[in-house]
Amino acid sequence: MTSATLPEAGAHSRPDDGGSESLDSRFPRSVRLLTGRDYQAVMRGGMRVHTANLMLVVSASPAGHARLGLAVSRRRVRLAHERNRIKRVAREEFRLSRAELAPMDVVVLAKPGADELPMEDLHRQMRHALKKASRKCAQS
């Protein structure tokens, strides 16, 4: 191989943050619940929003913007790939609707049977739950 065919140094590095993605299409640390204390505050003092297969626990956010936490347990969803699918859908729906959400902290929990839902139903339930949670949080 000649030096002309070798990849440039840093060719495989991550793109810088000034890329073509808009800020709304990301899921940065600032919009996630990160500590056990954050989760406890929401779980202890939050309102509950139910759908057939999901439960969201919601409380006003001290950060001043919406933040998401995920607690999909193995007890409710046995297979790891199904837990990951549920969390991926929750993150995606939160990310897409983040601009319209009230400043609230949300913890998503799966109910039994959530792992058997088709993708479109899971997306629909998550969207509905987020809208309902945002209305509830804005009223209180």
Image: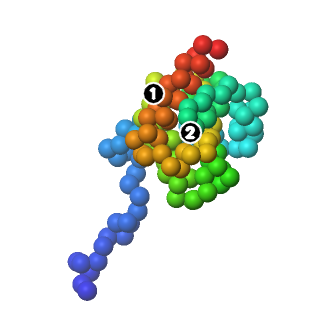
> Disc 2 designates what residue?
53
Q: Is residue 48 visible?
A: yes
Which residue is most to the bottom?
Answer: 1
Residue drawn at 56 percent across, 39 percent down:
53
Calculate the distance from the C-alpha at mark 2 to the C-alpha at mark 1. Answer: 25 Å
* Residue type of the residue flagged with mark 1: Ala
Q: Quadrant of the C terminus?
A: top right
Residue drawn at 55 percent across, 35 percent down:
52
Which residue is most to the top?
Answer: 139
Of residues 113 and 87, the one drawn nearer to the viewer in this rendering: 113
Residue 61 image offset from top left, x and y in percent: 64, 27
In the drawing, does residue 49 fall left or right of residue 118?
right
Which circle, 2 or 1, is nearer the viewer? 2
* Label annotation for residue 99: 1
Residue drawn at 53 percent across, 54 percent down:
82
Residue 9 image offset from top left, x and y in percent: 36, 70
* Residue type of the residue flagged with mark 2: Asn
Q: Residues within 10 Å of mark 1 (few under 14, many from 20)?
A: few
In the drawing, does residue 122 fall left or right of residue 9?
right
Q: Secondary structure at mark 2?
A: loop
